[in-house]
Amino acid sequence: MISIRIDEDLELREIHQKDRKKLYDVVDENRTFLKRWLPWLNYTKSPHSYLSVIKSWQQNIEMGTGMELGLFYREELIGMCGFTTIDPNSRRAQIGYWLAQDFEGRGLMLKTVKQLIDHGFKQVGLNRIEIVCGEMNYRSRKLPEALGFIPEGVMKEYEFLYDHYHDCILYRMLKSEWPY
């Protein structure tokens, strides 16, 4: 089981089927808040919705093509953070993250992503890590910018959000650029 300790209160760890009710509950409690930037919320209508999702996350971990992990604060599931895709041949990955609204503004996700990047470069052997953020999602963009990621460009109409396309910014960090 993958577990990355961030600090004494915070841990990233693999999500299992037994976690699907907790996962559904935190998503459902934050649905309106998260729906502004996450395109998949209409597909999660019950804990049962996560059966195949969690199975695919576990398969991606086994195959080395992804590592989506739950973020636990004092054993409470408060969000997710991980490598949504890993290209083992190119040693490249993309990070995705979301956090329950009550936990925003505390620096928890910044600490978590920093530790995940370190894990990616040192343990997974990655050379390039990307983060894609909605161009107008200024809160999310603060994270890669605070960690020194380089914006590589705006991707026009990159993602569909329920009733419209929106532009996204691609940020990158190379192992040779990682200052930590």
Image (spheres, grey):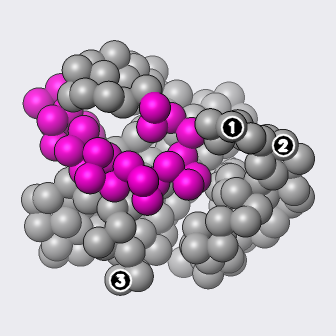
Task: Tell me the amino acid under the disc marked 2.
Answer: Glu
Q: Observer-nearest residue: 1 or 26?
A: 26
Could you give the CA–CA distance between mark 2 and mark 1, rounded to whole angstroms?
12 Å
Pinpoint residue 60: horizontal percent, then vertical percent: 44, 25
Looking at the image, which residue is at 33% across and 62% down?
100
- Magenta highlight range: 13-42
> Can residue 30 be found in the magenta stretch?
yes
Pinpoint residue 168: horizontal percent, then vertical percent: 77, 53
Q: Main secondary structure of the magenta part?
A: helix
Q: Answer yes or no: do the residues labelled 1 and 3 have beta carbons within 8 Å?
A: no
Question: Which residue has dot 1 on it?
Answer: 163
* Relative side of 154 to 95, left or right: right
Name the image quarter holding residue 148. bottom right
Q: Residues within 10 Å of mark 3 (few under 14, many from 20)?
A: few
- Helix, strand or loop under label 3: loop
User: In this view of the protein, can residue 180 be seen by the observer?
Assistant: yes
Quarter of the picture containing the N terminus is top left
Pinpoint residue 64: horizontal percent, then vertical percent: 47, 28
Q: Answer yes or no: do the residues labelled 2 and 1 have beta carbons within 8 Å?
A: no
> Can residue 55 be found in the magenta stretch?
no
Using the image, tell me which numbered label, if any, was put on residue 157.
Answer: 2
Could you give the CA–CA distance between mark 1 and mark 3, rounded to whole angstroms?
31 Å
- Give the number of callouts: 3
* Relative side of 17 to 78, left or right: left
* Relative side of 99 to 9, left or right: right
Task: Tell me the amino acid under the disc marked 3.
Answer: Arg
Question: Which residue has dot 3 on it?
Answer: 106
